[in-house]
Image: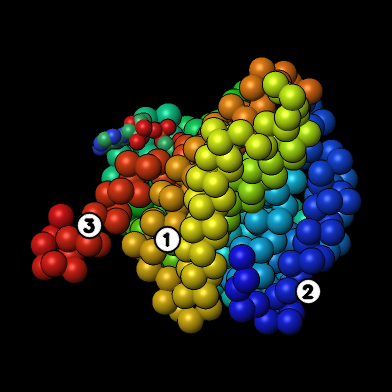
Amino acid sequence: MHFAFTEEQAMFRDMFADFAAKEVEPRAEHMAEDEDVPASLLKKAAMQGFLGALTPEDFGGAALDPMSYILLLEEIAKSDMSTAMVLHVHNSLVSQAILLCGSEAQKEEWLPALAEGSVIGAWALNEPDSIALGSMQAAAKLHDDGYALHGTKAWVSNAGIAGLYVIFANAPEGPTAFLVPADAEGLKRGNRDKTLGMRGVQIHPIYLNDVLLSAENVLGRPGGAQEVLDQVTDFSRLSMAAIALGGAQHALDLGVAFAIDRKQFGSEIALKGAIQGYIADSALEVETLRSQIYRCASLTEQGKLDREAAAIAKLWANRVAYQVGNRMIQTHGGYGYILDYAIGRVFRDCRTVEGIEGTNRSQQTAIAKSVLAAHGFAA
Ligand SMILES: Cc1cc2nc3c(=O)[nH]c(=O)nc-3n(C[C@H](O)[C@H](O)[C@H](O)COP(=O)(O)OP(=O)(O)OC[C@H]3O[C@@H](n4cnc5c(N)ncnc54)[C@H](O)[C@@H]3O)c2cc1C
């Protein structure tokens, strides 16, 4: 696809692709087997500025524009979606929330450490029985001049390597976001969750038992959790969509290479109509997804990314990643089930996308709400 990138964006994209090919791709299979994105790789990513990708230079970051950041996630995900996911949680959620909602003291304390990679960020919103602020059980009780956190958070990506958590809990003022160092007393990490896909991402529950915090740990204002979410949700959905795009492109590339190589009944299977149908439908979906994502990145640059556009990108990304991965498994025939072939890992990773940053159902709700509102109907 030809998109009007600036010279700098095109140069960055080539640089990201080069890093992914040299540093990520050769390790991808091992990372899934070992269930780890190694610290040595994150160190190399940090040296390239990828751990402070969106952070201003004043705080030691690379200050990428939104389009360049989306290209970073897409290119890394073409090699390994787990590595892209680690970068996404760290940058699009944790660093962004601090940058957009934090006090000057919080920015100075955390952004340079996050940018240099000496601290990895994790985002603890969801709970075993809650994926929304309204049903959240974690409590932040008043304690002296601060708060005491109690509760359980589930599905915390990067928890195995995190130095800093953004944790959401119900304070007397209402749902509130807190910055909590990983070594805070009373914070315990539970056993690793074994996952179907994106197996390099270290996901754990965390248990909060009387974690004492001062008022300085509040991110935004007490009772302001929704404001924090509103600041980051649309762009983080777009970021996750870019990871899905990279994964879907990878699946398509693997399927096409296999179809050209594999001979059956005397000719390459790439000559068979059914296989060409899989390839054509997949290329159609990948290209339309790419168009929507780049359009949204451009809207972000203009400060115009809205909930509907981001939810459309994420919903389409969920579907495309799954469908393209599924077709390319089928293109591989029996070899698609043999783990020596990368397509199995890529398909599992593509399938995992829907579980993150909102299921298809929640994207549909966001889109329908916005469409109905445009017709004067409040849903
Ligand atoms: C790999 C991975 C990494 C993650 N990382 C993080 C993280 O770092 N931090 C974090 O906080 N969370 C994280 N999550 C959690 C993730 O955001 C949630 O799993 C996701 O939002 C879905 O929540 P749930 O599992 O409770 O599903 P549920 O809400 O229980 O939904 C189950 C099913 O029911 C459907 N459903 C739910 N409500 C309705 C309804 N009203 N109408 C119709 N259908 C409905 C859903 O679409 C879904 O198909 C991660 C998840 C995964 C898979």
Residue type at the position of mark 1: Ala
Q: Which mark is residue 369?
A: 3
Which secondary structure, mark 1? Answer: helix
Q: Which mark is residue 310?
A: 1
Toward the viewer: 164 or 355?
355
> Ligand 1 sits in which quadrant?
top left
Q: Would you say 44 lies left or right of 361 here?
A: right
Mark 1 or 2, closer to the camera: 2
Residue extending farthest front: 266
Q: Tag 1 or tag 3, which sits nearer the N-term?
A: 1
Quickly name the residue at label 2: 11
Residue type at the position of mark 2: Met
| Residue 273 in view here | yes
- Neighbours of disc 2 within 10 Å: few (<14), some (14-19), many (20+): few
Q: CA distance from mark 1 to mark 2?
A: 26 Å
Q: Are marks 2 and 3 in contact (CB under 8 Å)?
A: no
Q: How many marks?
A: 3
Q: Which mark is residue 107?
A: none
Image point (84%, 59%), residue name:
18
Toward the viewer: 68 or 184?
68
